[in-house]
Image (spheres, helix red, strand yellow):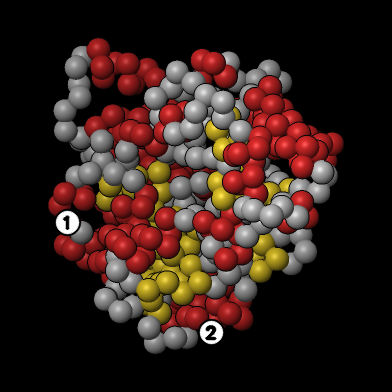
Amino acid sequence: MTDFPIDSLAQLRLRKSAKWQVFGTDVIPAWVAEMDFTLAEPIAAVLHDAIQRSDTGYAWTGEVGEALGVFSATRWNWIIDSQCVIPVGDVLTGVGHALIAKTKPGDSVVINSPVYPPFFTTITNVAHRNVVDVPLAWDGSRYTLDQEKMEEAFSRNDVTAFLMCTPHNPTGRVFDRSEMQFIAELANKHQVFVVADEIHAPITHLGNEFIPYLSVAGEGPAVSVISASKAWNIAGLKCAQVVSNSAQLYGTLIERIPLEVQHSAGHLGALAAVAAYTQGAPWLDTMLAHLETKSALLGTLLRGQLPDVTFTPPQASFLAWLDCRSLNLEIDPAEHFLTQAHVALNSGPSFGPGGAGFVRLNFATSPQILGEIVARMASSISEKT
């Protein structure tokens, strides 16, 4: 299999996105969830056409819900009502305002750390609710839900919502049907509102089954907040979707979410999302096959050069959750690799208490760049010892 066309490191540095601008040119960025692959042709064509006709006005999102419905039905056999879809600027905006709309000040929201760092601040600083962290359990081979502690948390009177990350970031877990059904039964039993961040769902690796939460949610109020942004590398264009599991819930959200939020999706983002959902599947499938090779390559490189770093291949996404605790570093591994190897990774502790000693690495790049990343990391450890 030949690789996607990927520019050289020097050419990638010409990009103006945050990934390539935050650090100096001596650093290889492998932190933020942005791929180095070239844009999918159907999306590039739609964007080029819009620019050529000076079509850069206010967003028309009328086709987004229907396009998502076509993709979800084909991909996951998940039938959604396109009339119950609210386009917003991004997933976190949808998450925050869904929580505001369906919970009250003083309420608590359950999360499962280690988890995407903005979950903490979205709950506390945007929704102004309290965080109840129920860490994932490690069963010796994978992360899983701690069902006993989840039951305890959902039983609390102050807990009225669960913010679920599925597929999970940073661990890459794709929760199986029994786990998803457990959450649905628990939520219905305790009348807990579920907000499922499913942004990584289209990047579920081949051979794994993604279970959309709303497909098992039952009657309890729940939303999926999803986007084409991660899978097709279009985060900067701004278009996510809040999908309600009932017309009644949709009506509540429409009434309570501010109009400026409901109109926060970008015009180019809406055009790109429709193209991704309706024409982007062939590119996506090819990209997923490439990610499988990059994940395998990363495992090989780590075993050969950094055998003390533990890597469990993710079931979804292009993010590797690396256990560096056996390196016995005196500082956060991310800080060590930035200062000593000039490789930018995400710091494990930012994902919650269970992240100490870990880093998150983005492997959606070329074999050459990935090889250089690991070589630099390994060299920094050998020099230390």
- Kind of residue indicated by mark 2: Glu
Q: Residues within 10 Å of mark 1 (few under 14, many from 20)?
A: few
Query: Quarter-wise, where is residue 302 in the image?
Result: top right
Q: Nearer the N terminus, badge 2 or badge 1?
A: 2
74 horizontally vs 325: left or right: left
Residue 178 - label? none
Q: Are marks 2 and 1 in contact (CB under 8 Å)?
A: no
Label 2: which secondary element: helix
Residue at x-position 29% and y-position 44%: 89
Between residues 294 and 302, which one lies in front from this camera angle? 302
Do we see residue 292 in this rendering? no
Q: Which residue is mark 2?
A: 152
- From the top left corner, tell me how far across and down residue 27 is, in percent: 56, 30
Label 1: which secondary element: loop
Q: Which residue is mark 1?
A: 258
Do we see residue 21 in this rendering? yes
